[in-house]
Image (cartoon, rainbow, N blue to C red):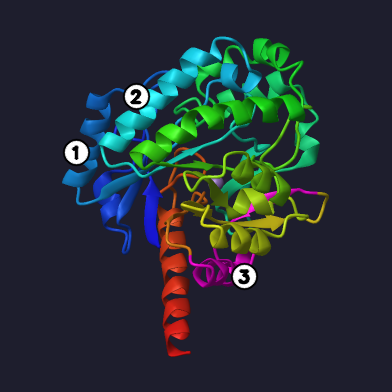
Amino acid sequence: MEMTFRWYGKEADKIQLQDIRQIPGIKGIVGTLFDIPAGEVWPKDRIKALVDEVEKAGLTMKVIESVNVHDDIKIGLPSREQYIENYKVTIRNLAEHGIEVICYNFMPIFDWIKTDLNYILPDGSSTMAFEKIGIDKAPEEIVREVEESTSDYTLPGWEPERLAHVKHLFDAYKEVDDEKLRENYAYFLKEIIPVCEEVGIKMAVHPDDPPYSIFNLPRIVKNREDLDWICNVVDSPSNGITLCTGSIGEDPANNVYDILAEFCKRDRIPFAHVRNIKYLGNDKDFYEAPHLSSEGSLDMYRILETMYENGFDGYIRPDHGRMIWGETGRPGYGLYDRAIGASYLLGLWEAIEKNKNKE
Ligand SMILES: [Mn+2]
């Protein structure tokens, strides 16, 4: 297990690499070239500059999050051929610079949805929440609200050039149901996984967030059956999962522990996001809780123990954190609460490891 920390790059992130270096136990950065639009090739010189910068700070970069998949690939338009070719070049370029894992998702239009980016907890800290009542709005309205509340920065998956076309995108997805999206996903995987095998990259799909359909859009990465289908459609160690305990756990019908056990055992989890959520007791409503078991609805000890017992040896990172101690910035991606989360997870891991060695 290697603990990492997501970083958006020196232009897009106000957190400095040096700050991350000072979090005990963090060895690696989960990096990105945030400004490159989905579908375009990531140039070698840009990748090299990023790796150099990270290494100069005493850290490594083995995981990328995310290389986004162009909507034309998901819709299955003829233009997908060029975008898939570009994706293959990006895979090769990343492998050449030491990258081992590429996180991505296969969600139509939106990368993720929360209805409240500034949900205030009783202790005064701020987090993100999803309440069904907040999703009975038109997609354009949600987009406008997100844009208004995040005018200072861009959120992953909410890049302005995509949002400008939301209405057009909804039209384009009209004929795409779950089955069609699956067909297009299989097509994509069959094209890219052989390249990954050749260059030693592991693809790691992030589950849909939340893991059920919203705005009637298709959703195909939401539960055990979906993950099983993905792993089987191209049966390769290069075709894996970013197991996000929060996203999977957002549907109480998902047994996050069983899912972790199964896919760790199958060696299909090269990368994990470990975070807690708190169900609000009303349908599937939840907020993103501090990482501690006692603060949320997931048992984090059991999560890490399951990973340990089933041979997890990939990269892990704390996922979204709250905004605390007066910090402001991109929701979910402050420094302090994620650092606390990382230390807590490392503490659990140490205890589990030492206990198992005693047995
Ligand atoms: Mn996640």
> In the rendering, at what x and y percent does residue 261 appear?
61, 64
Separation of residues labelled 3 and 2 (CA atoms)? 42 Å
Give the side of residue 86 with respect to residue 235, left or right: left
Q: Is mark 3 within 8 Å of ligand 1?
A: no
- Mark toward the viewer: 1 or 3: 1
Image point (27%, 42%), residue name: 98
- Residue 315 at least partly seen: yes
Q: Label 2 sits on what residue type?
A: Trp
The one of 232 and 333 positioned closer to us in this rendering: 232
Residue 41 image position (x, y, % from top left): 37, 20
Crowding at dot 3, Cα within 10 Å, few <14 / some 14-19 / many 20+, comes out as few
- The secondary element bearing badge 2 is classed as loop
Task: Please give the residue where the numbered disc 3 appears in the rendered image.
Answer: 294
Q: x, y (%) of residue 77? A: 61, 12
Task: Categorize mark 2 by other alpha carbons within 10 Å: few (<14), some (14-19), many (20+).
Answer: many
Between 35 and 100, which is closer to the camera in this rendering? 100
Res 171 quadrant in image:
top right
Q: Is residue 345 left or right of residue 185?
A: left
Q: Residue furthest right?
A: 283
